[in-house]
Amino acid sequence: MTWDAEIDCEGLLCPLPVLKARKRLMGMTPGQVLRIRATDAMAAIDLPHFCTQAGHGFLEARQDGPVGIYLIRRGARDLDEETGEDI
């Protein structure tokens, strides 16, 4: 699958991969795909949860050696993670 933007979160620990993904997704157009490279094992749990809460599509998670590769499709709108309401 192709992607529109990529962020490298290798070596960063929770919650930094999610925070960096959130910031990058906010600058993207709905439907675009973000690829994230992360070595923190918690990213495999945190990123799908973030996507569900924020209205983004979690497309793929796979391992490339010690690095997790995650693909997220930018949702149509921004949702507040706690309330689920539009921002």
Image (cartoon, rainbow, N blue to C red):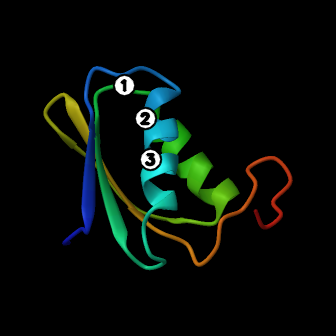
Question: Answer yes or no: do the residues labelled 1 and 2 have beta carbons within 8 Å?
Answer: yes
36 vs 85, left or right, is left
Q: Closer to the N terminus: mark 1 or mark 3?
A: 3
Estimate how packed mark 3 is, as few (under 14), some (14 to 19) or many (20 or more) residues with alpha carbons within 10 Å.
many
Amino acid tagged 3: Ala
- Secondary structure of the residue carrying numbered label 3: helix
Residue at 19% across, 28% down: 66
Q: Position of residue 67 (x, y in %)?
A: 21, 34
- The residue pinned by badge 2 equals 17
| Residue indicated by mark 3 | 21
Q: CA distance from mark 1 to mark 2?
A: 8 Å
Residue drawn at x 44%, y 47% is: 21
Mark closest to the chain's N terminus, 1 or 2? 2
Residue 40, disc: 1
Examine the image and state in which quarter residue 27 appears: bottom left
Local SS, label 1:
loop
Give how far apart the Cα atoms at labels 2 and 3 are.
Answer: 6 Å
Task: Please identify, in this view, whether the residue under mark 1 or under mark 3 is nearer the observer.
Answer: 3
Type of amino acid at the residue the image marks with label 1: Asp
Identify residue type, mark 2: Pro
Point out the image quarter for the N terminus: bottom left
